[in-house]
Image (spheres, rainbow, N blue to C red):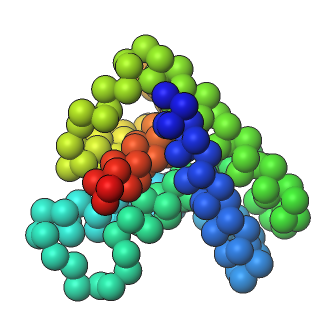
């Protein structure tokens, strides 16, 4: 499991690096997005991954593995937006870094707990199944959002964003291991 932990840490460090560099380029312009808009961005990226996977070819030359990094950062942004911080507030880079790291730590803690209980069974999963589960999680979020955040028995929106982060990490680990 230490390999999974170190891979998670490396992947999330890369995500943080991109997140902070984009913050330098664009500032906190994403803060105007409501969580539902971020969910739609996640839907678009996850749908592209599945479409290219099903077709076996891609016509847009953006590396497909980078879409998983984008999914992670959009999920982190959505989790930050759920914190109900004044959306009109521009956040300093140091504050954004702490917020990103805090959400990444939540996802990491969840990953370690689930890996303990499930024994890293995700390693036996096909990449296509991981992609499908990410899309299912997005559709769950959309349903919960349409229900104004209310659930009867199910986990909330944040739990699904955290799962998306972790399934993206699993996909990236599997992609890296398939190169070896």
Would you say residue 53 is visible in this rendering?
yes
* Left or right placement of residue 17 versus residue 5 in this view: right
Q: Residue at x 59, y 51 (%)?
A: 10
Query: 59 and 81: which one is in front?
Result: 59
Say which quarter of the image contains residue 91.
bottom right
Q: Residue furthest front?
A: 180
Query: Which x, y percent locates residue 108?
Result: 59, 35
Q: Residue at x 31, y 59 (%)?
A: 179
Would you say residue 139 is visible in this rendering?
no
Name the image quarter holding the C terminus.
Answer: bottom left
Measured along the vertical axis of the image, is residue 46 above or below residue 108? below
Query: 15 and 149: which one is in front?
Result: 15
* Left or right placement of residue 150 versus residue 132 in this view: right
Q: Residue furthest left?
A: 55
Measured along the vertical axis of the image, is residue 176 above or below residue 104? below
Measured along the vertical axis of the image, is residue 126 above or below residue 65? above
Query: 32 and 13: which one is in front?
Result: 13
* Left or right placement of residue 134 versus residue 90 in this view: left
Measured along the vertical axis of the image, is residue 51 above or below residue 24? above
Q: Residue at x 23, y 85 (%)?
A: 59
Query: 65 and 176: which one is in front?
Result: 176
Q: Residue at x 67, y 42 (%)?
A: 103
Q: How many marks?
A: 0
Query: Which x, y percent locates residue 66?
Result: 44, 68
Query: Which x, y percent locates residue 171?
Result: 36, 49
Say which quarter of the image contains residue 50.
bottom left
* Left or right placement of residue 162 versus residue 119 in this view: right
Query: Which x, y percent locates residue 136?
Result: 29, 42
């Amino acid at each position: 499991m230490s390999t999974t932990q170190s891979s998670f840490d490396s992947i999330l460090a890369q995500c943080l690096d991109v997140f902070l560099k984009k913050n330098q380029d664009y500032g906190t312009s994403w803060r105007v997005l409501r969580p539902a808009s971020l969910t739609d961005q996640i839907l678009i990226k996850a749908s592209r991954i599945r479409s290219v996977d099903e077709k076996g070819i891609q016509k847009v030359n953006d590396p497909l593995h980078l879409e998983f990094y984008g999914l992670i950062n959009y999920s982190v942004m959505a989790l930050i937006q759920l914190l109900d911080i004044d959306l009109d507030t521009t956040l300093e880079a140091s504050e954004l870094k702490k917020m990103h790291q805090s959400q990444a730590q939540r996802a990491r803690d969840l990953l370690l707990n689930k890996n303990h209980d499930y024994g890293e069974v995700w390693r036996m999963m096909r990449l296509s199944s991981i992609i499908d589960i990410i899309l299912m999680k997005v559709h769950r979020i959309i349903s919960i959002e349409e229900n104004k955040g209310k659930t009867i028995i199910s986990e909330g929106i944040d739990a699904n964003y955290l799962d998306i982060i972790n399934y993206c990490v699993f996909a990236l680990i599997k992609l890296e291991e398939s190169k070896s």
